[in-house]
Image (cartoon, helix red, strand yellow):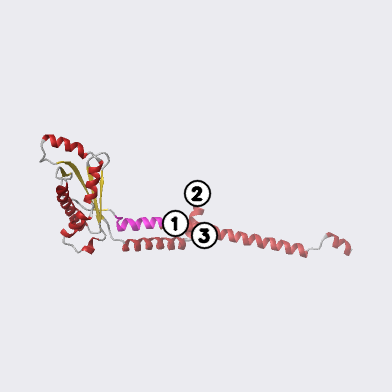
Amino acid sequence: MTWNDINALVLRILHRWWIVTIIVFIVVGAAGWRLSSSPERYRTTTFMLINASPDLGPADYMRVVGMVQSDIVLATYSDVFSSPRVVGPAMADANVWPERWTDYDVTVVREPDSSVLRMIVEGPDPTLTTALTEAIRARGDAVLGELYPIYGIDLLSNGPPESELISLPWMRAVALAGVTGLGLGILVALWFDSLVAYRRASLASATTRSSGMMVELRSPSRQDVVAQR
C-alpha cells in the first residue's frame, strides 16, 4: 500500500465522518447505559487449609492427616461451607436486612492436588462483602467443628479479607467502547462509501449503454442508405 492509497483511504473516511460519529455515540451510549444498570462487583478470596485437629494424640493425628487427602472429606467441607446452614446464619449475624444479600454469591472450591479450600464471596458493596466473608468463615468453622471435631481449619492469610473490584471501571469501559465504536464506525463508513461509489458507477454504465442504444436506433443502416440512392 502506497502513501497515495493511504491518503485516499483517509479522505474516504473523512468524507463520511458523520457515520463514524454516529456509530461512536451509539456504542458509547449503549456501554454507558449498560454500566449504569449494572452495579459494581467486589470479591474476596480466602484460602483455608483442612488439617487434623491439634487436640489429637500423635497416632490419631497422623491417621487423620492421611484421611484429609480424601476427596470425600474436602468435597464435604466445600459443600458445608457454601450450604444454607452456614451462609444463612452468617448473613443474619451481619445485621443486614435479608433483601440486601440477594446480589451476593458464595463459592467454595478445592485447590487442585491439595488440602486447601478457596472461598470466593462476591457482592456490590466492598464493606458488606468483607463482613459476609468473615461471618461465613467464623460460622463455617463452628459448624464443621461440631460435625467433624477431628479436623481443623487454618486460615492461610496474614490479615482480614480485603475486597477487590472485579467489574470494569467506568472510565476504562467508556474508553474501550469509544475505541470499539471508532473501529466499527470506520468500517461502516468505508462500506457505505464503497456502496455509493458502486451505485454511481452502475448508474453511469447503464446511462452510457442507453445512450449508445439510442444512437444506434437513430443512425440509418448502410442498406437503407443504398436503397435511398
Point out the image quarter for the C terminus. Answer: bottom right
Q: Which of marks 2 and 3 is in front?
A: 3
> Which mark, residue 13?
none
Q: Which of marks 2 and 1 is in front?
A: 1
Q: Quadrant of residue 152?
A: top left
> Which mark, residue 192?
3
Q: Which tag, 2 or 1, sits closer to the chain's start? A: 2
The x, y position of residue 64, in whole percent, is 17, 38
Residue at 55 percent of width and 61 percent of height: 196
Q: Which tag, 1 or 3, sits closer to the chain's start? A: 1
Residue wearing tag 1: 184
Q: Which amino acid does label 3 sit on?
A: Phe
> Which residues are drawn in magenta?
167-180
CA gap, disc 2 to disc 3? Answer: 23 Å
Q: At numbered mark 1, what does the secondary structure look like: helix, strand or loop?
A: helix
The x, y position of residue 167, in whole percent, is 29, 55
Residue wearing tag 2: 3
Residue at 62 percent of width and 62 percent of height: 203
User: Relative to 23, is 82 above or below?
Assistant: above
CA gap, disc 1 to disc 3? Answer: 12 Å
Q: At numbered mark 3, what does the secondary structure look like: helix, strand or loop?
A: helix
The x, y position of residue 122, in whole percent, is 25, 54
Label 2 crowd (10 A; few <14 / some 14-19 / many >=20): few
Name the dominant secondary structure of the magenta segment.
Answer: helix
